[in-house]
Image: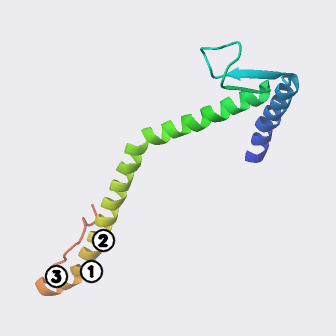
Amino acid sequence: MRRIVSLLILVPFALLVALLAMANRVPTRISLDPFTPESPVWSLTGPLWVVLFVTFTIGVVVGGCAAWLVQGKHRKAERTYKREATRLEREVERAKERAPQREAQTGLPALAGPRGR
C-alpha cells in the first residue's frame, strides 16, 4: 500500500520535473554583483532548470539545518529523560534484589503491592 501511494506521488512529480527541465533549457545568467549589472564580476550562466534545482536544494539544506538547530533542546531533554529512566530502572532492580533479604530478616513482605481490591 505504501509503495502504491509513493508511486502515485513520485511519478507525477517526476513528470513535472522533466517538463520543467525541457521547457527551461535557455541559458540564464545569474549575477552576484549588484554594482555592475552590464558586466558583472561574479556571474554564473546555465539553464534555468539547473538554477531552480540548485536553489531548491540549497533551500532544503538550509531549512533542514535550521530545524536541526531548533530541535536541539528537545534532543537534549530526551537524552536527560533516557538517563533518568535508566537510573530509575536500575534502582528498581536493586530494590527487587534486596526485597527477599529484607523479608527474611523482618518476616514482613518488603515490596508487596496492593492486594485484591
Residue at image position (86%, 27%) is 19
Q: Are marks 1 and 2 in contact (CB under 8 Å)?
A: no
Of the two numbered discs 1 and 3 on the same chain, state the one appearing first in sequence.
1
Q: Which mark is residue 90?
A: 2
Q: Which mark is residue 97?
A: 1
Residue 20 picture location, percent across and down: 82, 25
Residue 117 picture location, percent across and down: 27, 60
Spatial separation of the CA atoms under disc 1 and disc 2:
11 Å
Residue nearer the viewer, 114 or 67? 67
- Picture layout, residue 28 above or below residue 81: above
> Helix, strand or loop at disc 2?
helix
Q: Look at discs 1 and 3 and give the one toward the viewer.
A: 1
**On the image, numbered disc 3 is attached to which residue?**
102
Q: Quadrant of residue 38?
A: top right
Q: Quadrant of residue 73?
A: top left
Tell me the amino acid under the disc marked 3.
Arg
Residue nearer the viewer, 23 or 117? 23
Residue at image position (55%, 39%) is 64
Q: Are marks 3 and 2 in contact (CB under 8 Å)?
A: no
Residue nearer the viewer, 102 or 29? 29
